[in-house]
Image (tube, rainbow, N blue to C red):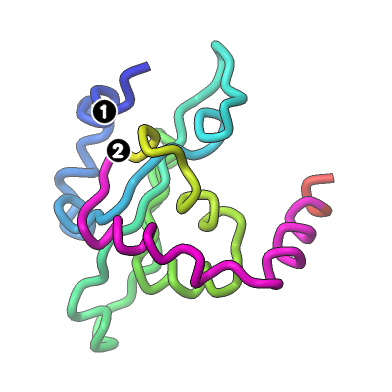
Amino acid sequence: MNFVKLMMSPEYDFLRTNPRLGKRIMLMGLGGSYAYGTNNENSDVDFRGITLNLQSDLLGLTEFEQYEDKNTDTVIYSFNKVIKLLLECNPNIIELLGLDEEQYLIKTKLGQELLDNKSLFLSKRAAKSFGGYASAQL
């Protein structure tokens, strides 16, 4: 499947037109079964990404944590929220830092810098975080 072509389709126009997304997206890749290699002919496509906060967010004048498009199973997190979740070893975010190179659809210099420093976020908390996630799935 050509994911870049899919991302450029009209159903994903929000990626280009939303002022919090567009050129502010620093990293975006596959999620779900396509990221894990467990996809089949009935699998939907999940995209996960990180966008930079606006200056007004950083100053506390506005608030933004994530953008979710349920029609396309796309979730784009704010950079500030991602850092918080990474420090907690949140499985949904940690997986975004461990994709194969070809599974990244958008990767800016800042996105690459985050990937280059992913080891900063791995700690013993991961055992508790992933264990809790696995227990919840059971």
Decide: marks 2, 1 in contact (CB < 8 A)?
yes
The magenta stretch spans residue 108: yes
* Label 1 neighbour load within 10 Å: few <14, some 14-19, many 20+: few
Residue furthest to the top: 41
Disc 1 marks a residue whose amino acid type is: Val
The image shows a total of numbered marks equal to 2
Q: Which residue is mark 1?
A: 4
Q: Earlier in the sequence, mark 2 or mark 1?
A: 1
Q: Main secondary structure of the magenta part?
A: helix
Q: Which residue is mark 2?
A: 105
Magenta residues? 105-134
Q: Determine the image quadrant of residue 126.
A: bottom right
Q: Looking at the picture, does residue 24 appear above or below residue 104? A: below
Give percent across and percent down for residue 96: 47, 50
Q: Looking at the picture, does residue 64 appear above or below residue 29? A: below
SS of the residue under disc 1: helix
SS of the residue under disc 2: strand
Nearest the eye: 137 or 127: 127
Give percent across and percent down for residue 94: 54, 57
For the N terminus, give its image quadrant. top left
* Label 2 neighbour load within 10 Å: few <14, some 14-19, many 20+: some
The magenta stretch spans residue 80: no
